[in-house]
Amino acid sequence: MSLTSSCRRILRSNLVTRSGFQKLLPAVSRSVHCSSVKEQKLHSAKYGGRHCVTMLPGDGVGPEMMLYVREVFKSVGAPVDFEEVQMDHTSTDTEYDHAILSLKRNGIAIKGNVESGNLSPDATSRNVELRADLDLFANVVVCKSNPGVKTRHNNIDVVIIRENTEGEYSNLEHETVGGVVESLKIITERKSTRIAKYAFDYALRHGRKKVTAVHKANIMKMGDGLFLESCHKVSEMYPTIEFDSMIVDNCSMQMVSRPEQFDVMVLPNLYGNILANIATGLIGGAGIVSGVNIGEKYAIFELGTRNTGKKIAGKNIANPTAMLRAGSDLLGYLGLHLHSDMITNALDEVLQDEQMHTADLGGQATSAEVVQRVISLIQKERNI
């Protein structure tokens, strides 16, 4: 039987926290969200000097990517143990609850994408449900040009920060009369302010110069207008960071024609999903970009786009780079920077070699060949 929402609220209240919260999630202002946020820390289980991380293989290429993550973590000597919990599109409510409990216990996860193909009105996307139940309010995708990947633009360096828990993903739809459906888009001042504050804090911490709020306030004057107004108010707290705004349709065009103008972008849920996919495509595609969903207590590292790769699963042709980058990001978040850097450096070097490009990058290398090359470079760096 599925846990009730009341039980989930009780579970949320019984948490252990950790001091590494500010490694990735900047402290939120006293005046934003609630006064207690500044005292919260992100929980991460650690036993005998080793970190325990929840692993959610997901659908499509997810399970095989997780095997590669294990191999690379072993090669780099990362002090991480995985608690693997099955969660895919066939998972029952009980299995989903086990995944939630594991995440609350460990505080951090690496996750494969879960298929959301069920079009039944009663079906809920497990991806959306997970983000809502754990309040993973920020999705962060860093898209930066890589010299080893030939693309139309070679000077892209943009961070997409997406509000992850409301907007068009609020799951509030109903049929008023036959053939007429209302789908509610929820925008709140609290969550808009929270994501704007996160974006500006991120820019400040990472030496970024500008934050662009993306909206459609010229048409959705109240909903997107509230989002834009909230971003503008937050921008006044950061005089050293330039702030501008752009309508989402124009932004999409500008992203493919002049992407170098963007630095940090903050967006409501649906726009963030679309623009992150555009930016990912511009630098080489879903196979090389990682992302993270993060909240005030938990973090889930995954691919930068929500593709499962179902059609190429089991064929040894999927690009493992994105999931290995997600693993590297996770290690950096845990403070294991030496291990993280070794993986990142190896991945960057592999991308410079066209012989190691998988089919998505126009090459013929297999998934296993790329992983073995990464491992050999790590072993060389470790003098093994």
Image (tube, grey):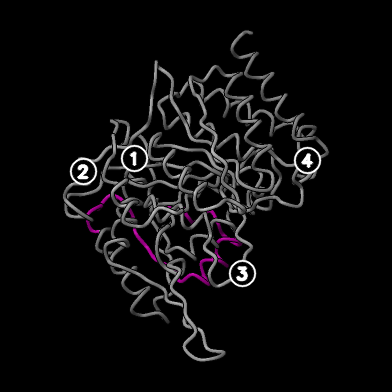
Name the residue type under label 4. Answer: Ile
Q: Which residue is mark 1?
A: 205
Work out which quarter of the rendered image holds the C terminus and state it: top right
- What label does residue 38 carry, if any? 2
Name the residue type under label 3. Answer: Leu
Report the side of 100 relative to 357 (left or right). left
Label pair 4/3, CB-CB below 8 angstroms: no
Answer with mark 2 or mark 1, whichever residue precedes in sequence: 2
Residue depicted at x 47% and y 43%: 98
Q: CA distance from mark 2 to mark 1?
A: 16 Å
Name the residue type under label 2. Answer: Lys
Position in image of residue 351 (x %, y %): 69, 34
Q: Is the residue 46 above or below the residue 191 in the image? A: above
Answer with mark 1 or mark 4, whichever residue precedes in sequence: 1
- What label does residue 119 carry, if any? 3
- Mark 1 or 4: in front is 4
Label pair 2/1, CB-CB below 8 angstroms: no
Q: Nearer the viewer, residue 198 or 191?
A: 191
Name the residue type under label 1. Answer: Arg
- Mark 2 or 1: in front is 2
Magenta span has 123?
A: no
Q: Which residues are magenta?
A: 236-264
Q: CA distance from mark 2 to mark 4?
A: 45 Å
Label pair 1/3, CB-CB below 8 angstroms: no
Q: Which residue is mark 4?
A: 317
Q: CA distance from mark 1 to mark 4?
A: 37 Å
Q: CA distance from mark 4 to mark 3?
A: 29 Å
Magenta span has 246?
A: yes
**What secondary structure is marked by label 3?**
loop
